[in-house]
Amino acid sequence: YSIVFSYTKVRENDIAEWGLFMTLTQLEYFCTVCRYHSITKAAAALYVSQPTISTSIRDLENEFHLKLFNHGRNRISLTKEGEDFYQKADIILKQTQELYTTFSDIERNRHPLKIGIPPILSTVFFPEIADRFQEKYNIPIQLLEYGSMRAQTLIDREQLDIAMVNMNFYNLEKYNSYVMMEDQYVYCVSMAHRYACEKEITMEMLKDESVILYNTDSVQTQTVISRLRNAGITPDVRMYSSQLTTILNFIRGGNYGAFLYSSLAINFDDFVMIPISPKITGKFGIIWKKGIFMPEHLLKFINFCQKYDVTPHWPKF
């Protein structure tokens, strides 16, 4: 969001037009630093990097030709001009929040919080999180199923507000993120499968195996394929599927194996889950776009997820 000021300062026979451009996000960063007397603490509170805040403050100083802060060894303080600037900026942010609060109910009804969830994670713990959040805050949520890689693209385009993802993709640093849990992959087969009695599975043992994998926009699938190819194996993928029910039915048929997360597989007792060697683990959590103005309902959801206990029930191997 941008605030655009255009005003005319009149003197004798002289008119000077100044155009000033700054963002609400810059003002929010500045005011938060003022409250914490620390860029480090402000960055932690706002889920942004310290350089992001420093750059925003420097841009404000350059735009208004002001020095806003005095920098000490362990603390920063406002200059006289900075104090005056803070008073005005704080008023703007409060008025903006009042405007948002006044019309938030209308806006929420029109635009629910859009959350992307991978099909596989939606069956583990996310439905419970969404239900509990709505019970507590009465904020509408729209859940949309996307693989982790597709979800990050939609976050970039601001078509999703936030996404639950497998956090093992390569450019995680581009996003604000919070890790909620860690899990390990297991290889699942029917009780009649030739590997049903094995204590562990290596990639080499899957050379002649037909496997079922999640869709290609799944980080889990990309991780598994990478491990197989590193072992010199071209996987015989019989089917890519986004539906857990379909995958489980193929497993139960007896001829195919599939990679699942242990916290998911432990919920079923009609097939065998085998540890993978070397172990494959994944971290799961939420990501959201950097450098955006954070509406209240998004901040509430992030804080809710950070406090929510999603510790999985680990299987005993």
Image (cartoon, helix red, strand yellow):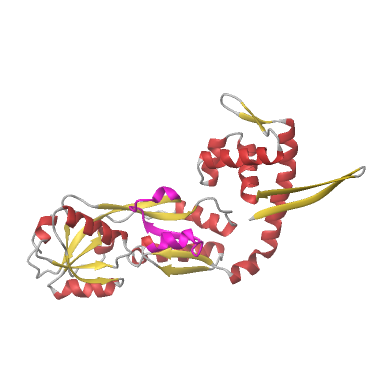
In the rendered image, residue 168 lying in the magenta stretch gets the answer yes
Which is more toward the observer, 135 or 63? 63
Q: For the C terminus, which image quadrant?
A: bottom left
Q: Position of residue 23 (x, y in %)?
A: 64, 50
61 horizontally vs 8: left or right: left
49 horizontally vs 106: left or right: left
Q: Position of residue 152 (x, y in %)?
A: 42, 59
Q: Give the total number of marks visible in the rendering.
A: 0
Q: Position of residue 78 (x, y in %)?
A: 68, 32
Is there any visible trace of residue 264 in the rendered image? yes
- Quadrant of the rendered structure where residue 127 is? bottom left
Q: Residue furthest top?
A: 73
Q: For the N terminus, which image quadrant?
A: bottom right
Is there any visible trace of residue 317 in the rendered image? no
Q: Residue furthest right?
A: 12
Please report the residue visible at 61 percent of the width from the left and 44 percent of the height from the top: 29
- Which stretch did the figure color magenta? 150-174
Please report the residue visible at 29 percent of the width from the left and 68 percent of the height from the top: 215
84 horizontally vs 249: left or right: right
Q: Residue furthest front?
A: 13
Above or below residue 150? Residue 245 is below
Q: Position of residue 116 (x, y in %)?
A: 43, 64
Which is more toward the observer, 237 or 12? 12
In the rendered image, residue 40 lying in the magenta stretch gets the answer no
Which is more toward the observer, 136 or 50? 50
Which is more toward the observer, 248 or 39? 39
